[in-house]
């Protein structure tokens, strides 16, 4: 496998052999309430996530007046509304984000956000964000990508609903702007994402094609697909969370509640430990069991000093602390150095 380029956000490095970078996606689940957003930050920090991410936008710059709701949004909000009216209720002001950034700093979790327009990008840059998340729909927003590249902050790019050619064009746009600190996220832009369309193998496809860190932005129900993504090679993991799935809002139903977020982080840390090394060699935890459960060559009868060892003098029994049965051919034909009783584990010193 070609060398994968690594990047850093603050003091945390993202890439091969580094811990999975876990992003707790608060998104718009705060419903425009700064106090609720602050609670979400504290929950994310307590869960052990590396970062908490919000969505930064101005509704009038993001959606035209008549832009219709997506089908999944119609199920969660009043169907008569438009995207712009829905977004207006979920919008946070620059002062709100400044406060939330300070809360993140105070509890020791990275503040991240996805800008959906150039004004919101500038606002985030003015706050001194150390990375920018590009949401899946913005992968074809070339002016936004050019501006991110010009800012020279690491770009975390989601690829939901994109073709490989579109991902390549987005990465090229960032690289042409001299931005090379890029990570990609495999993502399925469906809410929830069906299991049979999740295609976690795309993680490897993107990694091998672009030689960049690749993560998974998980919109599937539950914890297990995100955990499987880590086993499949994801170096970053993003998952929506909420304080309560019963709250109103377009993304609440597919989000994890606090205890589930904590369980996800714990499981990911266990899985990344379990992935371990590619070298096939006995592990320290196996040695005692191996010696107990494997077999040794054992005598079937008494053997006198000087006798030549024959096959019928040998059998195999536990434990595996003597001569291994696989070496029997090297034993047969040798002579006993001392008297050996029946049912005795053979050692090299006896021959």
Image: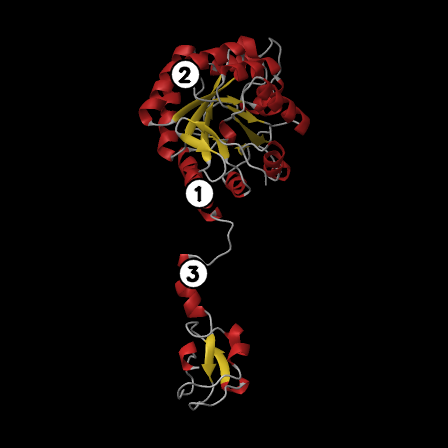
Query: Residue 85, image x and y in percent?
Result: 54, 12
Between residue 285 and residue 119, name the one nearer to us.
285
Quarter of the figure with the C terminus:
bottom left
In this rendering, which labeled residue sits more in front, label 1 or label 2?
A: 2
- Using the rendered view, name the quadrant where residue 92 is placed: top left
**Left or right side of 84 for 99:** left
Determine whether the residue tagged by mark 1 lies in a helix, strand or loop. Answer: helix
Determine whether the residue tagged by mark 3 lies in a helix, strand or loop. Answer: helix
Residue positioned 50% across, 36% down in the render: 235
- Using the rendered view, name the quadrant where residue 126 is placed: top left
Question: Would you name the residue on which mark 3 appears?
Answer: 286
Residue positioned 41% across, 41% down in the render: 266
Q: Is residue 345 above or below residue 292?
A: below
Q: Is residue 38 above or below residue 85?
A: below
**Left or right side of 197 for 15:** left
Question: Would you name the residue on which mark 2 appears?
Answer: 128
Query: Residue 287, image x and y in percent?
Result: 41, 62
Residue 267 shows which numbered tag?
A: 1
| Residues at marks 3 and 2 touching, judged by CB atoms closer than 8 Å | no
From this viewpoint, is residue 127 visible? yes
């Amino acid at each position: 496998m070609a060398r994968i380029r690594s990047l850093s956000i603050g003091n945390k490095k993202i890439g091969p052999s580094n811990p999975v970078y876990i992003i707790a996606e608060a998104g718009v689940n705060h419903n425009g309430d700064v106090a609720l957003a602050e609670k979400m930050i504290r929950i994310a920090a307590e869960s052990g996530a590396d970062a908490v991410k919000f969505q930064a936008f101005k509704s009038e710059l993001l959606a035209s007046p008549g832009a219709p709701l997506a089908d999944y949004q119609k199920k969660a909000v009043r169907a008569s509304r438009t995207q712009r009216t829905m977004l207006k209720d979920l919008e946070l002001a620059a002062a709100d984000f400044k406060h939330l950034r300070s809360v993140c700093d105070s509890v020791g979790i990275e503040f991240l956000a996805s800008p959906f327009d150039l004004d919101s990008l500038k606002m985030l840059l003015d706050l001194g964000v150390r990375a920018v998340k590009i949401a899946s729909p913005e992968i074809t927003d070339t002016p936004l990508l050019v501006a991110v590249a010009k800012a020279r902050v690491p770009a975390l790019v989601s690829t939901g609903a994109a073709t490989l050619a579109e991902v390549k064009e987005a990465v090229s746009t960032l690289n042409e702007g001299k931005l090379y600190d890029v990570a990609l996220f495999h993502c399925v832009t469906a809410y929830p994402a069906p299991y049979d369309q999740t295609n976690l193998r795309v993680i490897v496809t993107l990694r091998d094609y672009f030689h960049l860190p690749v993560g998974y932005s998980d919109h599937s129900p539950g914890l297990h697909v995100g955990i499987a993504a880590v086993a499949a090679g994801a170096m970053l993991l993003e998952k929506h969370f909420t304080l309560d799935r019963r709250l109103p809002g377009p993304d609440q139903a597919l989000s994890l509640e606090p205890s589930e977020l904590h369980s996800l982080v714990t499981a990911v840390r266990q899985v990344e430990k379990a992935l371990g090394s590619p070298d096939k060699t006995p592990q320290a935890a196996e040695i005692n069991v191996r010696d107990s459960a494997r077999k040794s060559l054992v005598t079937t009868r008494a053997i006198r000093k000087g006798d030549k060892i024959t096959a019928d003098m040998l059998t195999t029994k536990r434990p595996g602390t003597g001569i291994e049965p696989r070496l029997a051919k090297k034993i047969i034909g040798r002579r006993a150095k001392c008297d050996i009783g029946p049912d005795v584990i053979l050692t090299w010193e006896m021959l």
